[in-house]
Amino acid sequence: MDLKQINTTALAYLGDAVYEVYVREASVRRNPANIDAVHRSNIRYVRAEGQELAIRGLKDELTPEEAALVRRARNHKITSSPRNVNPMTYKMATAFEALVGYLYLSGDKDRLEYIIEKALSIIEAQGSEVSQRAERK
């Protein structure tokens, strides 16, 4: 399978699921006793605003191939977007998810885990900003 030929929407669809599993696993490991708190804390990581922060923070660490995929996914025409999300934020979040899907399908687990861990760190560091923006909407 030539990963460069896969539709970025399909990569984002898969990447969304893969990323969600990593976020949930990290949260359960931190706080296995209180699932309600875990769920509430996960929201900042899976919201489009958080994913946009992550992909912008990762841009200097992407390989040329990954950067090209992110540009292709970001520039892909969207036919719908959630009504409470800025279209550019949605495109950037979709690009992040496409990158995760691409790395998952490539089988490069080390790179996938590095990107996700780095994304979680970026969102964690700027998490209050994401929460404040989400509350204003």
Image (cartoon, rainbow, N blue to C red):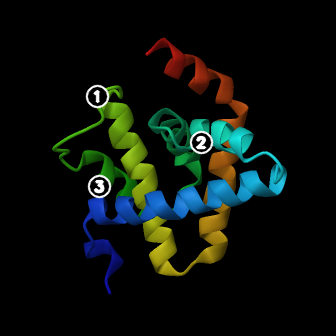
Q: Are marks 3 and 1 in contact (CB under 8 Å)?
A: no
Badge 1 density bin: few <14, some 14–19, many ≥20, Cα 10 Å = few
Q: Name the residue at 67% across, 73% down.
A: 110
Q: Label 1: state its secondary structure.
A: loop
Secondary structure beneath dot 2 equals helix
In the picture shown, does residue 126 fall above or below 32?
above
* Labels 3 and 2: the sequence-earlier one: 2
Which residue appears at 50% of the width and 73% of the height?
Answer: 104
Q: How many marks?
A: 3
Please name whichever residue, 135 or 121, is drawn nearer the observer in this view of the structure. Answer: 135
Residue 36 lies, with reference to residue 100, above or below; the image says above
Query: Left or right of 127: which side holds 28?
Result: right
The residue nearer to you, when weighing 31 against 23, is 31
Dots 3 and 2: beta carbons under 8 Å? no
Badge 3 amino acid: Arg
Task: Identify the residue under disc 2.
Answer: 45
| CB contact under 8 Å: marks 2 and 1 | no
Q: Position of residue 122 (x, y in %)?
A: 66, 40
Q: In the image, 108: left or right of 87?
A: right
Mark 2 or 1 closer to N-term? 2
The local secondary structure at tag 3 comes to helix
Q: Amino acid at mark 1?
A: Arg
Real-space Cα separation, disc 3 to disc 2, in angstroms: 23 Å
Residue at image coords 38%, 33%:
89
Q: Nearer the viewer, mark 3 or mark 2?
A: 2
Residue at label 1?
83
Q: CA distance from mark 2 to mark 1?
A: 19 Å
User: Which residue does the image show at 64% across and 54% down from the upper left?
Assistant: 23
Q: Is residue 104 above or below residue 2?
A: above
Q: Which residue is mark 3?
A: 72
